[in-house]
Amino acid sequence: MLLPCFNEEAAIAATVAGFRAALPGAVIYVYDNNSSDRTREIAAGAGAVVRTERQQGKGHVVRRMFADIDADVYLMADGDLTYDPKAAPAMVDQLIAEQLDMVVGTRRHDARDAYRGGHVLGNKLFTGLLSGLFGRSFSDIFSGYRVFSRRFVKSFPVLSSGFEIETEISVHALELRMPVGEVETAYGARPEGSHSKLSTYSDGWRILKTIVTLYRIERPVLFYGGIGALLLALAIVLSIPLVVTYAHTGLVPRVPTAILVTGITIVAVLCVFAGLILDTVTRGRREVRRLAYLALTATGQV
């Protein structure tokens, strides 16, 4: 049981107690990310194993957690009392019973203050974008409430540093075609004195850049091929007046435009070939990740 914690003194004790009651056999780890209050002391007093990650950002915390902890089943949740611990047993049971690699706790927010309107809209937009780019997606790609198998955790490199980590997790599962599931869970308002560290605009921009970067890395043919197609279309549009003039007069009076069209066409062709070459590299990387994934025993098997 993994709880990233970011200055949530008011909520951490209740969060730890809730998950201890829901999963009495689990070891609960709280990872402190430079808290300035009594979070560490309170979490330890509640029975959690407290560890520290000094590099600021949720991605750094998740990287450290996944590297340090060795378990058969991992459950990750934010330590801010927004996720319902009572849903944890059902999520773990589904992972084990169906031999899945990830179960996402999709958030159902009944409280008006639980989920800001900008976050709701952004979640829908980015979920749709991810589905359009990668062919399928999840109902809630930004949920921090997830259960993982050992296979998932130990084959996931974790390259993100901030809140875009959930996007990277989702793409990792999609690209390796892992068996995944979803469980609807209640999502509550934060306790008084606690506030979200997620910035609607700055973190939204970072998440968008992460999606585009992952698309460039995982779909190089479509990414660079699309750029090449746009450049080729531009070259054709620019060349039409030249072709018409040449057909009527046999002359090419606008030499700079002709040179520009030639240059754009060359770049377009290079983009297409770059995509084809990088696709070979991507395929090799995906095979290595798949082999690392298969080297581990599936959850529920001996």
Image (cartoon, helix red, strand yellow):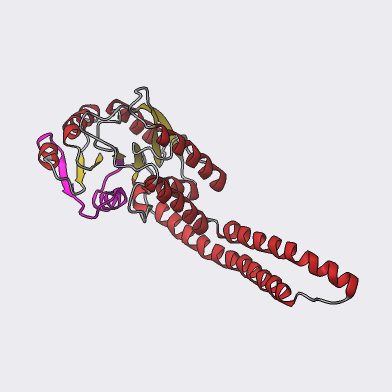
Q: Is residue 76 left or right of residue 251?
A: left
Q: Is residue 150 left or right of residue 10?
A: right
Residue 270 lies, with reference to residue 175, above or below; the image says below
| Residue 297 appears in the rendering | no
Residue 216: image x %, image y %?
A: 52, 58
Q: Residue furthest top?
A: 110
Q: Residue at x 84, y 70 (%)?
A: 245
Residue 200: image x %, image y %?
A: 38, 41
Q: Is residue 67 magenta?
A: yes
Q: Nearer the viewer, residue 286 or 25?
A: 286
Q: Nearer the viewer, residue 223 or 67?
A: 223
* Quadrant of the rendering where the C terminus is positioned: top left
Residue 84 lies, with reference to residue 158, above or below; the image says above
Residue 139: image x %, image y %?
A: 47, 34
Which residues make up the magenta segment? 45-74
| Residue 101 appears in the rendering | yes
* Quadrant of the rendering where the N terminus is positioned: top left
Q: Nearer the viewer, residue 264 or 141?
A: 264
Residue 221: image x %, image y %?
A: 59, 60
Q: Residue at x 56, y 62 (%)?
A: 279
Q: Is residue 101 left or right of residue 253?
A: left
> Which image quadrant is residue 228 in?
bottom right
